Image (cartoon, rainbow, N blue to C red):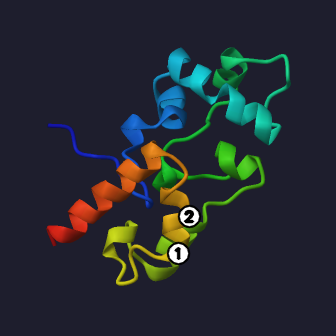
Amino acid sequence: MEKLKLAACGIDCTECASYRATMEQDLESAKFLVPWYKNMGWIGENEGAEAILMKNPLCKGCWDSTEDCFFKRGGGNCKIRECCVEKQINHCDECIDFPCDLYMKFANINDFYKSAKERLLSLKANT
């Protein structure tokens, strides 16, 4: 069984479109990212999945983050990751305050993020 590559927020990186587009050059994952990249201004209005794949490295997982990470290049920074770094923990389930307001704002965005929350709740329950 392959070990989970778990982000600070509980996302299994191997299930994440950004990670798969980077590490596997997966065109279907990149297609899924097109609306988000356009909204962020990271690709032009007439660009698509191929433009996303050309912007490597996009995401190697939040613990392999470097200055060329797409999120940092876009001017962003993950508040959840920053919090875990500050508290010197691997992911949110290790925090006494989990699930906090910051995390719940993230987890309630969509079902994909809700599954990350469920994963962390399960890990917390088993510790």
- Residue that label 1 marks: 101
Question: Looking at the image, which residue is at 56% across and 41% down?
Answer: 59
Question: Looking at the image, which residue is at 85% across and 23% down?
Answer: 45
Viewer-proximal residue, 17 or 111? Answer: 111
Q: CA distance from mark 2 to mark 1?
A: 6 Å
Q: Position of residue 127 (x, y in %)?
A: 16, 72
Amino acid type, residue under disc 2 in the picture:
Lys
Label 1 CA crowd tier, 10 Å (few <14, some 14–19, many 20+): few
Is 88 located above or below residue 111 in the figure?
A: below
Q: Is 90 displayed left or right of 33 in the figure?
A: left
Residue 47 shows in this picture: yes
Is 19 located above or below residue 104 in the figure?
A: above
**Quadrant showing the N terminus:** top left
Q: Position of residue 55 (x, y in %)?
A: 70, 29
Q: Which mark is residue 105?
A: 2
Amino acid type, residue under disc 1 in the picture:
Asp
Q: Position of residue 23 (x, y in %)?
A: 47, 30
Question: Looking at the image, which residue is at 49% across and 67% down?
Answer: 103
Q: Is 121 displayed left or right of 28 in the figure?
A: left
Viewer-proximal residue, 23 or 99? Answer: 99
Q: Is 29 displayed left or right of 6 in the figure?
A: right
Question: Looking at the image, which residue is at 41% across and 52% down?
Answer: 114
Q: Position of residue 30 (x, y in %)?
A: 59, 23
Contact flag, marks 2 and 1 (Cβ < 8 Å): yes
Label 2 CA crowd tier, 10 Å (few <14, some 14–19, many 20+): few
Identify the element where label 1 is drawn.
Answer: helix
How many numbered marks are there?
2
Viewer-proximal residue, 80 or 3? Answer: 80
Residue 68 shows in this picture: no
